[in-house]
Image (cartoon, rainbow, N blue to C red):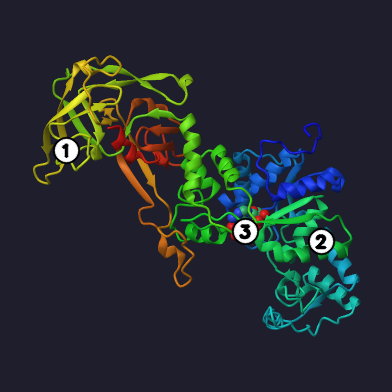
Amino acid sequence: MESNENTRETNVQSNFIREIIDEDLKAAKNASRVHTRFPPEPNGYLHIGHAKSICLNFGIATDYKGLCNLRFDDTNPSAEDVEYVNSIKEDIKWLGFDWEDREYYASNYFDQLYEYAVKLINKGKAYVDSSSSDEIKNMRGTPTVAGQLSPYRGRSIEENLDIFTKMKAGEFKDGEHVLRSKFDMSSPNMNLRDPIMYRIRHAEHHRTGDKWCIYPMYDWAHGQSDSIEGITHSICTLEFENHRPLYDWYIKELEIFHPQQIEFARLNLNYTVMSKRKLLQLVEDGIVNGWDDPRMPTISGYRRRGYTPESIRSFAEKVGVAKRDNVIDVSLLEFSIREDLNKRSQRVMAVLNPLKITISNYPADKVEMLEAVNNPEDETMGKRLVPFSREIYIEKDDFMEIPAKKFFRLSPGNEVRLRYAYIIKCEEVVKDPSTGEVIELICTYDVETKSGSDKTGKKVKGTLHWVSAKEAIDAEIRLYERLFSEEDPLGDKEKDFKSFINPESLRVLHNSKLEPFLKDAKSGDRFQFERQGYFCVDSIDSTPENLVFNRTVTLRDSWAKIQKNS
Ligand code: ATP
Ligand code: MG
């Protein structure tokens, strides 16, 4: 098997689409070529659902030594924009895929599509309808009641050609006429009831300018574009299953190369929304800070949040390819990113909500450099030195004046280990006299308990991360939670999905303290903050003077683990 150029790599999980391709190759269909495409409409940024489709289309092309085109489906001038085109290209590259020189646009084919339409008119398979859009809607019927034939359906070929030419020449206003296919007004499949092929739109197109004032509908443009490009397997989502007879009909009537459309279930995730139109509302209403807000399910949002391309690809692989709609738990995506970052992340200590500790028996001017492990999962990453001194910060949460049951961290009279350092004991609690808030702890340390050379045999139940106060770097930390508080924000049709935004989806900490190792951290760098999760330097707002970190994801079960270790 391995010797055949077109067999797939054995380490890839099979699915029903690959089975169809395997069969086609066995039958030497399409001269044993495999050619797919990813066809985004440039009307928004790509989201994780698109990532799934990208991994599928480009992945199949790679595995079968075939090709995958990038084709912008730019048939709707009013919603589309070059900003979106550029972001889409950036996102696909970042995910690790390459369309080489095959960057195409449906608008490249507008001339060809026009000629194809003329061909259908000449065959008596298309006609100009001069009914208003309301009239067309009212004559469409229902799934159980056949539609009515348009009074214009019987127009002569000559008249159709004449009006269609004038439509193209700009002689009519928007909505005056449409070109429709003459398919079947009584089909139970509503998509086949003489679907519209062209509508008049006097709108500037981001690529063709004002050359055109008639624009093809998706169904008319898509299959023909696939055919022109020699696509063998046109993979799309399930909502197009009912459009397949139309896809096939156009191609058959035009007598052109016939790609096969194959439908799979779109990816749905809980606690978010995925349609570009809905995401655009979040952007336009200022509910999020742009398409790349780290709470967005967009590829640019995940990138800014610190996700890796590897983790998204591995997620897409884990999700698999289904024939039925389903909803994937967002925790599977979180699992994929943790799995990846755990292997590769530099560990550091960072205190998000600092509480000062003075170690009263530690010499005032002394600074010790202590050895810390960079990544326990990867020895080759080595060790680093972390300064320790008399004044340090620990996490506010790691102290309780009156410890709750099973709280094994710091409390008055109690001992804990400072990671890579010493065992300390809390001797005194200093409070703000006006508010009663704990503002400092006075502790003592046991010089005999230095990590790595502790022979005291002393056992403590908690280990805390910390940073030395003098050497610490200040940072802003952005903590993200799920964007919606409801699992299915679209589930309640009575309510606006935007009313389910999680008010805790972004919390900003302005006073966090990092170990000095992070002073040269650059845009996009990723770290594990011990006990806190994975964080990355924000690519937009962080500067060397004012570091800003995004929390990519928490550590799994961090609380459970702390209590168990301790
Ligand atoms: P949206 O409703 O989010 O705007 P769309 O399908 O209109 O999505 P397109 O730009 O037309 O977006 O999609 C490009 C390709 O990505 C299509 O082949 C489409 O089927 C696929 N795709 C879109 N959303 C998903 C998803 N959630 N899961 C898998 N594939 C998807
Ligand atoms: Mg679309």
Disc 2 under 8 Å from ligand 1? The reply is no
Q: Mark 3 highlights which residue?
A: 324
Instruction: Tell me which amino acid carries mark 3.
Output: Arg
The answer to which of marks 3 and 1 sits earlier in the sequence is: 3
Secondary element at image label 1: strand
* Quadrant placement of the C terminus: top left
Expressed as whole percent of the image width and height from the top left, the position of residue 19 reads 74, 48
Residue 154, x across and y down, in percent = 86, 82
Residue in front for this viewpoint, 17 or 435: 17
Given this view, does label 2 or label 3 mark the residue nearer the observer? 3
- How far apart are labels 2 and 1 at the CA level? 73 Å
Label 2 – label 3 distance at C-alpha: 33 Å
Is residue 264 visible in this depiction of the protein?
Answer: yes
- 59 or 548: which is nearer to us? 59
Tag 2 residue = 113
Evaluate if marks 2 and 3 touch, with contact meaning CB atoms under 8 Å apart: no
Q: Which residue is mark 1?
A: 439
The amino acid marked with disc number 2 is Leu
Q: Secondary structure at mark 2?
A: helix
Name which of mark 2 and mark 3 comes first in the sequence: 2
Which quadrant: the N terminus? top right
- Image position, residue 126 (x, y; %): 84, 72
Alpha carbon separation for disc pair 3 and 1 = 56 Å
Would you say 53 lies left or right of 212 here? left
Which amino acid does the dot numbered 1 rest on?
Ile
Location of residue 416 with respect to 7 vertically, above or below: above
